[in-house]
Amino acid sequence: MIDFLWCGKGLLRFFPLGLVKRFLHYMSLYDYAIIRFQHGVLPFKCQIIEGWCKGAWDIRINGRSWKYLFIYLFLCQSACSYPVFCIHFFLDMKASEILAVLFVLVCLRRYATLADKGEEEILQCSCENTDDCLNNTCQGRICLYSYNHGRVVRGCFHSSEQCYVPSVPEVYTKCCFTHLCNANLSVPEKAEDKSIRVILLVGLPLLVLLVLSMVACGLVLWLRTRRQHNQPVEHDTSMLKVPSGGDPTYGDIFDEFCTSGSGTGLPYLVQMTMARQISLAECVGKGRYGEVWRGTWMGESVAVKIFSSRDEQSWFRETEIYNTVQLRHENILGFIASDMTSKNSSTQLWLVTHFHELGSLYDFLQYSTLDPESCLRMCLSIASGLVHLHTEILSTQGKPAIAHRDLKSRNILMKRNGQCCIADLGLAVIHSQSNDYLDVGNNPRVGTKRYMAPEVLDESIRVDVFESYKQTDIWALGLVLWEITRRTIVNGIVEEYRPPFFDVVPSDPSFEEMKKVVCVDQHRPSLHNRLHSHPILSAIAKIMKECWFQSPSARLTALRVRKTLSKLDQDHEYDIDKLKLDL
């Protein structure tokens, strides 16, 4: 008792009196005194320990830290098969609290040792199925009841350590500490298979969750299959506007929604399911940012640009631009839809547009030559498309001004009628004059270095001014016109296709190489003498030079280029008509 009082003084020294009182209240000194020791630790019954833990939990909720009680009860409960509540705050203790717990544990263990060395009371126990039974009784310090695979054993132990038996299925051992206390003991319900109970408690919820997940997945697959089967009917009857007269065809739908310059393309709900309706036929092009495939939709060819996952911003930006109201123009690539699909467990980003079998202007110029009239028609169509992009349309459903930022021969497509259409709007900049809004986008891509204007190369461009981006487009337009005129036959003379600055930079020039050529040396593509011998090519050559001024503000606008080329085309047609009349 003196030692226990010494421990109590220690408790009062470490903790406020109120907390000590609550501690003693929950640990019930009466139960503590009358229950003897088993398993090498304090012989608290598991149910009592669990009740103490819950009580301590309530005190902790009320605002005071009782983690030391949790830890000690956890140590006591290690002899039980289910440490339920007392483990939660083991890793959340402060250093002072850990010292307090150790102090309490030492006190109680000391008390337990003294009690263990105290009165050695000899108990009379019920005896059954053992060799030391005398008149069905035996004597010892501890009474034993054991159930082992259907065989019941009652007897005596002389040491508390003998009571410790690891938990094994269908084996149950119970020790008690009063006379004949084991006579009325029996196996608790399903005590021999506590592990099965644990498995059921853990496994049954997991099994239910697995079944529910399988049911949910099956339901989703069923709904998707059903919707996929129903889509063709829904699209033909409600989602698509089909011109009256005759059966709907791809040509009708495409002319209605997505001729080159289709504006917003197909209705949005149709766009979301386009990937399921298109079968890919062949890959017609590859680049740094993905592939271009020829696909079949409703029996006709479409172009499917498949973006790589790392270029999601370009796909998103291009989709955003193409969905701009009133973007429709014959010299802007016709947009049909954009969709996100999955193939081989990877996400694919699709942009579906009109298919032009002649390919890009870059590819076309590799194997084709032009006459001056065809050259003029192509140059005029490109300028017209650029004017439409640069122009803001003010109305209730207007169009913001758009700068391309990556104009080049690879991003211009050839049409069957000899005109061109501008494609690849992934780097485009949007500007609305009505609210002074400039949207540069969030695309980490940069333009093609070979076509970069001087102010971009020397980083003097005013990135907060929309006109700056339009002026870089004009620089690139002049280079594209130069590529076209090289492949134009004049007096039987034509040059091989070459990219701009082919004679001063390598095939894949660096930023610094282009900066030196364009900004430092102020080099410009050379013009062949034959161009000056033809009025059309001579006028185009003059336009090119005015697109290449070092000062951005001195360059022509897209509208001025188009007007000049348009007048040139009209004058040429007038001359032809006059010549026919003279003949």
Image: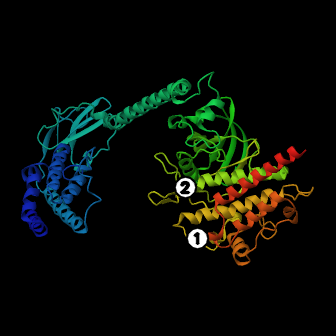
Farthest-out residue, right: 492
Rendering coords of residue 83 (x, y %): 26, 47
Question: Is residue 361 among the parts visible in the rendering?
Answer: no
Please tell me which residue lies in front, 440 or 224. Answer: 440
Which quadrant is home to the C terminus?
Answer: top right
Q: Nearer the viewer, residue 155 or 234?
A: 234
Q: Residues within 10 Å of mark 1 (few under 14, many from 20)?
A: some
List the residue tagged with mark 1: 461
Q: Do tag 1 and tag 2 residues touch (Cβ < 8 Å)?
A: no
Specify the amino acid type for callout 1.
Ile
Left/right of residue 436 with respect to residue 514 in the rendered view: left
Q: Residue at x 82, y 46 (%)?
A: 577
| Marked residue nearer the N-terminal end (1 or 2) | 2
Horizontal side, residue 260 vs residue 439: left or right: right
Q: Which residue is mark 2?
A: 401
Name the one closer to the observer, 100 or 307. 307
Image coords of residue 42 (percent x, y): 19, 52
Q: Residue at x 70, y 65 (%)?
A: 547
Q: Specify the amino acid type for callout 2.
A: Ala
Picture layout, residue 68 above or below residue 135: below
Secondary structure under badge 1? loop
Specify the color scheme.
Answer: rainbow
Left or right: where does residue 352 sit relative to residue 225? right
From the top left corner, tell me how far across and down residue 579 is, in percent. 86, 48
Give residue 448's position: percent from left, percent from top.
67, 62
Q: Mark 1 and mark 2: span between their CA atoms?
A: 19 Å
- Residue 199 can be seen, yes or no: yes
Which one is in front in this view, the residue at disc 1 or the one at disc 2?
2
The residue lying furthest to the top in this view is 246
Which element carries disc 2, helix, strand or loop? strand
